[in-house]
Each structure stands twice: as C-alpha cells, then as structure tokens.
Image: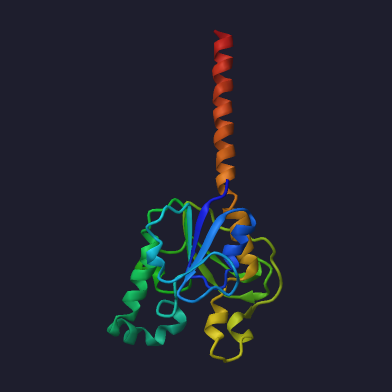
Amino acid sequence: MGMRILVACEFSGIVRDEFRALGHDAISCDLEPSERPGPHYQGDVRDLLGEPWDMVLAFPPCTHLCVSGARWFAEKRADGRQQEAVDFFMLFARLDCPRIAIENPVGIMSTVWRKPDQIIQPWMFGHGETKATCLWLKGLPPLVPTNIVEGRVGRVWREPPSPDRARIRSKTFPGIAKAMAEQWGTLEGAQTRRLALREAEGLNRKARQVKFL
C-alpha cells in the first residue's frame, strides 16, 4: 500500500514523479505551476500542511538562508527577509508528520536550528557535479550513495547567466530524486515486514515454551 506524500516547494515534479512511479500518492506544491503533468497544487503550501501526510519532503527557498549570499545577510536581517525565510523553514521542522525530509544548501539553519543529519553531493548519485546539499531528517534514514562518479564541477559554473539560472539550479538532480523514492518509498513495506517477522518470532517462541512445558 502506497503512502500519501507531499513534495513541498517543488515545481519541477521530479521528486513527485519518482515516488508516483513506485505507486505512492504523491503530490507536489509550489507557487509556480508544475513543469510536468501530474498532481500539483499551485498555491501556498500552508494550505496543505494540516492534512494527514505519511511523508513530507520539503525544499524551502534558500535565497535568504544559504552561505553563498552571506554578504547580504546584514541587510536581510534588518528588513526581516531572513527571519521570514527561517520561519517558513521551521514550519516543516515542527510539522506533525512521522516522516520528514527538509533540503537546503549549506546555510544558517545549521546554527539557527541544528546541524543537518546528512550532507550529500550529486556525484554520489550519478551526476558529475558538486553541490553540497543538507538534509534534515525525521523518521527517515540517511540516503545511501547509489552511483559514485567522477567529476567535481560546481553546478553554478554549468549554468550561464540567464533569468532562469536560479530556477534551473534549484531543481533536484534526477539521481537524488530516484534514491529518495527507492530508499524512503519502501520504508513502509520494510517496516511492516519487520513487524510481521517479529510477531512470527514471538509466536514461535511461545509455541516452543508451550511444547516444553
């Protein structure tokens, strides 16, 4: 049985579609329309956070949080943009949901909240590029690298200046999305099997005790 999954702040549909391919009821949400056909809520994700989700994967905007923009931090703190971004990030951190993953580049949330559970790179998942990506996890294990490849070119250098540069860079690498779906999307079934095995072992122990008595 599939899980009901919210992929928050995703317009590409890349992560959503990987989970849907495995039979999960996954929906993406963003202020922008989905680039791919599929279940997508175009609007404020806060409209959906009160629903009963089995898993929430969040990709909150990092513009005012990541260290690459540190030279503007004083200005952003003064006008409230940074605090607004922190508060939005923490909506997901405090969410009442059994499985949560929050993705962001290296930034201030490591000190404002806590250090991430894991930092991954695209080259761990089949893409010959560097882009340190932090994952804060609840009820989910760290991702296991699936295909370590050569190539250590920063993603920023692959994208020429353009109005869509930030948009392109914000998309999840397909190899990472696939790893999320394959490793996190099978947890429910794995947990059910483990519980069934434990229950069977318990019954077997009781049967042996009865026979011994």
Quadrant of residue 115 within the rendered picture: bottom left
Q: Which colour scheme is used?
A: rainbow
Q: Using the image as rendered, state which of residue 39 and residue 202 is in the foreground.
A: 39
Q: Is residue 156 above or below residue 181?
A: below
Tally of numbered discs: 0
Image coords of residue 42 (percent x, y): 47, 71
Q: Is residue 200 above or below residue 31?
A: above
Left or right, 52 with respect to 176, comes to left
Image coords of residue 154 (percent x, y): 61, 80
Visible residue check, residue 11 = yes
User: Furthest-right residue in view?
Assistant: 150
User: Furthest-bottom residue in view?
Assistant: 161
Quadrant of residue 125 within the rendered picture: bottom right
Residue at position x 59%, y 58% from top?
Answer: 19
Work out which quarter of the rendered image holds the N terminus and state it. Answer: top right
Residue at position x 38%, y 87% from top?
Answer: 72
Q: Using the image as rendered, state which of residue 22 and residue 47 is in the foreground.
A: 47
Q: Using the image as rendered, state which of residue 70 and residue 18 is in the foreground.
A: 18
Q: Is residue 160 above or below residue 21?
A: below
Visible residue check, residue 144 = no
Work out which quarter of the rendered image holds the C terminus and state it. Answer: top right
Image coords of residue 183 (percent x, y): 60, 54
Image coords of residue 203 (percent x, y): 56, 22
Residue at position x 59%, y 10% from top?
Answer: 211
Q: Is residue 127 above or below residue 23?
A: below
